[in-house]
Amino acid sequence: MLKIQAQSKIPTDYGLFTMYAFSENEENWSPHLVLVAENTDFNKVVNVRFHSECITGEVFHSKKCECGQQLDAAMKYMSEYGGVIVYLRQEGRNIGIINKLKAYELQEKGLDTVEANLKLGLPADGRNFDIAVEMLDILNIREINLLTNNPEKIKSVENSSIKLNSRIPLEIDPNGVNESYLVRKKDYFGHLLEKI
Ligand SMILES: [Zn+2]
């Protein structure tokens, strides 16, 4: 079972957050993280983003996806309106960075983001959002607005004891490199994208 291992205030370019580290045991060096913006009231409807780790996009500003920009936009939004970012250690739709780079190599040979994973014998999307709900539960958050385009994330909340008040779209403009990736997100995974 997940539990809060540590917490601390983190001042950022977007404002002050409290960061919580969640894992089953203290020895876990990659715990899930929850960032709570200053002035977030858990007794009201809480704005929430479930965000899965993407080191290429967030740290190295890869243009192959829009994860880094989505995370920045979410931090900005939470800072302005209050809210919580649940940062899940599910790199590469939960295939890990090594497999993600292998999949990217296959994409250079013409396969798309779904075909490449399947060719490697991996799921197209192996993420699990129930753990995000579990963390909200531990924090005693009862009703949320979810910042997402992903119907799987919406389902995970609808199937939980947490009430979904509304969905807030979090769409980033295509950048000239990631169009085909966004098209697959829309036509294969059913993401609610208007700009592609
Ligand atoms: Zn990404």
Image: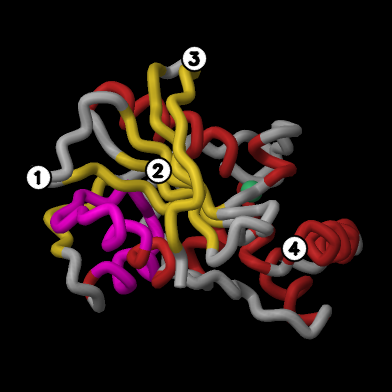
Amino acid identity at mark 4: Gly
Residue 194 locus on image (x, y percent): 37, 49
Residue 11 versus residue 96 in the image, above or below: above
- Identify which residue is drawn at 50% across, 51% down: 5
Give the crowd class for mark 1: few <14, some 14-19, many >=20 residues within 10 Å.
Answer: few
From mark 3 to mark 4, how far is it between C-alphas?
28 Å
Disc 2 element: strand
From mark 4 to mark 1, how far is it between C-alphas?
36 Å
Disc 3 element: loop
Say which label, 4 or 2, has the lower sequence index.
Answer: 2
The reply to whether discs 1 and 3 touch (Cβ–Cβ < 8 Å) is no
Say which label, 2 or 1, has the lower sequence index.
Answer: 1
Q: In this view, does 119 lie to the left or right of 146?
A: right
- Identify which residue is drawn at 27% across, 37% down: 83
From mark 2 to mark 1, how far is it between C-alphas?
17 Å
Residue 37 locus on image (x, y percent): 32, 30
From mark 1 to mark 3, how far is it between C-alphas?
27 Å
The reply to whether discs 3 and 2 touch (Cβ–Cβ < 8 Å) is no
Q: Which of marks 2 and 1 is in front?
A: 1
Amino acid identity at mark 1: Asn
Label 4, on which residue?
96
* Residue 69's disc number: none
Say which label, 4 or 1, has the lower sequence index.
Answer: 1
Disc 1 element: loop
Label 1, on which residue?
43
Say which label, 3 or 2, has the lower sequence index.
Answer: 3
Q: Residue 152 lies in magenta, yes or no?
A: yes
Amino acid identity at mark 2: Ile
The reply to whether discs 4 and 1 touch (Cβ–Cβ < 8 Å) is no
